[in-house]
Image (cartoon, coloured by chain):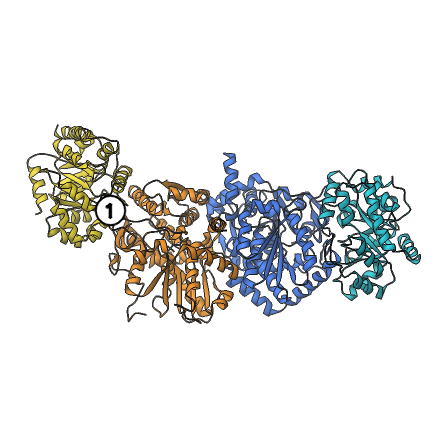
Chain colours: A blue, B orange, C yellow, D cyan
Amino acid sequence: MTDSKVFMTPPDERGHFGTFGGRFVPEALMPACLELETAFVEAWSDSHFTDEYRKVLHEFGGRPTPVTPLHRLSEQLGLRIFAKREDLAHTGSHKINNVIGQTLLTKRMGKTRVIAETGAGQHGVATATAAARMGLECTVYMGEIDTERQALNVFRMELLGATVVPVTSGSRTLKDAVNEAMREWVTCVQDTHYCLGSVMGPHPFPWMVREMQSIIGTEASQQLQQLGVEEPDLVVACVGGGSNAAGVFAGFANSSTRLIGIEAAGGSAVGKGSPGVLHGMRSLLLQDEFGQIEEAFSISAGLDYPGIGPEHAYLAASGRAEYFAIGDEDVINALQVLSLTEGIIPALETAHAVAWILQEAGKQIPLGSTVLLNLSGRGDKDVAQVREILRAQS
Amino acid sequence: MTDSKVFMTPPDERGHFGTFGGRFVPEALMPACLELETAFVEAWSDSHFTDEYRKVLHEFGGRPTPVTPLHRLSEQLGLRIFAKREDLAHTGSHKINNVIGQTLLTKRMGKTRVIAETGAGQHGVATATAAARMGLECTVYMGEIDTERQALNVFRMELLGATVVPVTSGSRTLKDAVNEAMREWVTCVQDTHYCLGSVMGPHPFPWMVREMQSIIGTEASQQLQQLGVEEPDLVVACVGGGSNAAGVFAGFANSSTRLIGIEAAGGSAVGKGSPGVLHGMRSLLLQDEFGQIEEAFSISAGLDYPGIGPEHAYLAASGRAEYFAIGDEDVINALQVLSLTEGIIPALETAHAVAWILQEAGKQIPLGSTVLLNLSGRGDKDVAQVREILRAQS
Amino acid sequence: MKSLETYLRALRASGRKALVPYFVAGVTPHWVQHVEAAVHAGADAIEIGIPFSDPMMDGVVIQEAALRALQAGTTFDSLCTDLAKLSTSVPLVAMTYFNIFHHYGLERSAGKLQSSGMSGAIVPDLPLEEADQWRSACAAHDVANIFLVAPSSPADRISSIAKATEGFCYASARMAVTGKSNNTGEGARVVSEIRAVSDVPTYIGIGISTPEQARAASSVSDGVIVGSALVQIILNGGGADDVESFVGGFRRAIDE
Amino acid sequence: MKSLETYLRALRASGRKALVPYFVAGVTPHWVQHVEAAVHAGADAIEIGIPFSDPMMDGVVIQEAALRALQAGTTFDSLCTDLAKLSTSVPLVAMTYFNIFHHYGLERSAGKLQSSGMSGAIVPDLPLEEADQWRSACAAHDVANIFLVAPSSPADRISSIAKATEGFCYASARMAVTGKSNNTGEGARVVSEIRAVSDVPTYIGIGISTPEQARAASSVSDGVIVGSALVQIILNGGGADDVESFVGGFRRAIDE
Ligand SMILES: Cc1ncc(COP(=O)(O)O)c(C=O)c1O
Ligand SMILES: Cc1ncc(COP(=O)(O)O)c(C=O)c1O
């Protein structure tokens, strides 16, 4: 832990984490962002709301998710590895935590509809799910290319009653889906909440989503203690926007645990990005020499984002968390290793974190270390893709 | 409750539930069945074993799964419906409960390998998963037609380290996969356990699998009490072989709760079958006038079995449980209704139970009744199929 | 003692090793002629396979034959009618799965076997523990119940089975379903364990597919059962001549 | 007071309603000629859109134009070079997203705007709360910061924005991104709320696509901004003549 600084507290009153964060949105959206901030601050300190949030997470979302000791992998690597099983949450990833919080908040604000962006569809399916459960209307913006690549997830969202709008602007992928959702939000902000999917966007989203995901770290820290682990040596999580990482880090931010975020090499905003402003936030972004945003390229759709949540940019700058990148070629192998040794097929996103552990055991991770892997999601959504890739290789 | 009879106790010493059950296997397998029976009886009364079983179910399997009040559906139907969420268990259905128990028992017996049959692949994936976790070799027999229909599940099993053997005999579906697994078991019984996937087969399987699934009912009954429901009026579960139904029924067998099993109309062994002997058991079977076994036909692969577990045949005969059938045409609608109103896409198997509740609310289910639906699995495995069906209809 | 056992004991007493070929009833329209050809070539008894949809103890060859027989419309009744055409002095033994008799009715099945000239029955998925009712049905109709012993059977089970079996005791040479095999198996051990507790005639079956295997097996037992290798010939389109020469080859090897 | 505001106040004082057409820099090689044509047809100031990859406040037309401009290699530097060819007396106002300036450097950006003849800047994703650094960079280079007021802005925000804006205040007529619209919008209300707290010139934009809309909007404000409808003409292949007649039509409608 760096000196006496305290980490993962609320940002300043205008949403800054150090020099990152803030609220860079059109004036038309400022009132909605302010309203949301007020509503969130009130709700989050209202035990009726937080009780209801935890109740729905428990009864509907499947929380607490367990912490699984990865016995066989631990033995192979000479580490003590535990996995926080977000893959067992409803809809198959940590995304549900956030959407349950935001849809409850939507109702509290008296709004009747949510919109959301989605890349591969995980956040879209989660939002559609929570909206169905809460009786809210739901529209999901999804890059046209992604609607084609992930046609089954489009169908899932439709089954859940959501309208999926293919976004035809720009690169027709996630980044443009966010742009489009913002554009649409301008037109319907009175009755509609924009349910953002990660710790990104304008204040209060990065903070609010982190808070709504922090249940991961809170649970994990207690569960590890019950398993006899006072404080793990490392916590490792993959980072797209950074919500699962932020959620798990939150449980360990003010301990001496090393916090490690793993980005996709083709979407490494910390490794290859520079400060910039996009989607309502100042953060680290992939951009060209003229400040035009670059597309991210990763085998895993959930890490295919050219930015990172602003609090991560701050944690990186302050040295409290470290960020590394893993290339596509190591991801498939990591997915296979975890499946074979532990009987858990992880999401491709999660497999980045696994790959880093495999790579660094005995190097950056001293033998004998206790490691908490945040198993952010299950790989069911990815098996068709992995099969194609392995076929093409053989 | 029918008089003073006690239900869901162990069968007689040769495995009979009334006139059903027993052990109809080749002599070559008798010693293995006897060994298994002894091992199971010992293990099940050894708290080291049961503690380990519950621990793995908790840490790895994701138990306890929650009970979710289905608020919106309840309001629409005028009932109080709760869902036991086996869809949130690892691998997406109740199947994991059984395979964790059986693989632990395999290790206890000193065997190093498991074989299993699978239809659509749910039990195969679950077995491969548990085998990976326990470090056991695994071979899964799957009808050749099913390996083609469910190629992704074949790939999942392979990712998990299992060998999948396409079965080319007979109808090349589940029934023949069981035959083939039995045939193979004869050849390798010394070091191999046959991890049967439902409450079927020769003694002690129907009893053992029921016991290993009874955690569903045990948990649900406690959870309902915590939600203020002393005893539900009905428990409704779908029935293929009958393991999820047996598991949930076990928690309510000796209460006054009505126990309802829902079969697929095209695989309705209670509704259209007659007593017979197959796969090591005497039970109700679909058969022609000459005693040749008939194929089951259902939209849901998991209910595509021409028999039913012998204890269900007994529960039906004794009147303790009631069995009804639901046709394919109502299943898709039920899947859509649950998705839309509650944000849960159920497995097609489970959707049979949902369809019956939709159909009978206010009829066989008096308005105001408290109903526990056993939500045996998630629908992710089925969405591609459902999409094709809906497309073909429109 | 059932007539079948009396007959087979007399056969053994005569110093002759029993050769028991297996046929799937109804697999071809002229299957009864194949049976006759086998008798002509020196078979001492015939196993008549009654086809079942789910032959759990059978390998691919007999599975295929059963499927063809079923597709041709073979039923328990129809094959009994066919058997009326057969004139032979050697005993016939039915072999099928329990559901066929269970469904037909146990009493009725035993009566039908008897009236159709079948003096014994092998039901591989009906172990001793479940056989009481079937045994009493057979008792009334002079049908001998033939039980199998497997290489995995422990001593106490071998003893019970050897006591309960009628006609002969079926010693499985291998832990496997029916089918060809190159492996000589454990028939000799199984037979000696049976003989330690019973003097019932004991035949080796499961995987006997060449005259050499048959000779070796019969040298340590009272006879051999030949199934898949013969059924394969018929599946390949072989006629009565082929059956006769195949069975004759086994006869000569055994008698050498 | 920044020169831009002095100029626009003088324009208002002269009784003339301001017509401000919007162009995307670099969308065609001859885009500067289009700007000249607009001035010729009576534009009072020009908005110069600096293309950005992720134009969050823009509808499909301007998105498409920005994409084309970027694909043609347009950069902040290159468009400034292009502007050197432009000889006009009317003020130029840059319009872009904050990342362009953030990345170029705030101080350096403001200097570049000034040296390229752009006396104002509209940055729609830079709200008042985040604008301090940019405002001080602009202060040193006589670049006026133009803020937007939206129909959703509450009174206290309108008051702060109206006080902070320089040059003019941009009144959004609609809760929508740029693009054509048939809806007349809430421009009049927004303008009157701004006027209640400030006497800064106030122009209506967002969705003004016909001369009739422009006339109506200018009758309740100090001027109008015309974007997507004009950009569409250029995307359709229109040349300087088309621009001139389009802008001329708006001029006449406003002046009527
Ligand atoms: C399983 C999983 N993990 C991780 C991510 C990345 O998102 P974040 O970094 O916000 O956790 C996603 C996004 O879709 C995901 O589905
Ligand atoms: C989700 C689900 N439910 C039910 C079943 C039916 O099996 P059982 O009747 O043994 O519960 C299956 C079988 O694959 C299944 O996958």
Q: Name the residue under label 1.
A: B26
Chain hosting mark 1 = B
Horizontal relation, residue B365 to residue B29: left or right: right
Horizontal relation, residue D152 to residue C221: left or right: right
Label 1 CB sits under 8 Å from any ligand 2 atom: no
Q: Where is residue A310 in the image (x, y as percent from the top left)?
A: 68, 53
Q: Where is residue B264 in the image (x, y as percent from the top left)?
A: 37, 55
Task: Classify the position of the C terminus of chain C by image quarter.
Answer: top left
Q: Position of residue D21 (x, y in %)?
A: 82, 49
Question: Residue type at mark 1?
Answer: Pro
Callout 1 crowding tier (Cα within 10 Å): few <14, some 14–19, many ≥20: many
Q: Which is nearer the eye, A30 or B55? A: A30
Secondary element at tag 1:
loop
Q: Which is nearer the eye, D235 or C92? A: D235
Q: Which is nearer the eye, B205 or B40? A: B205
Horizontal relation, residue C246 to residue C89: left or right: right
Q: Where is residue B374 in the image (x, y as percent from the top left)?
A: 42, 61
Numbered label tally: 1
Residue A370 in view: no
**Height in image: C39 above or below D196?**
above
Residue D170 in view: yes
Quarter holding residue C25: top left
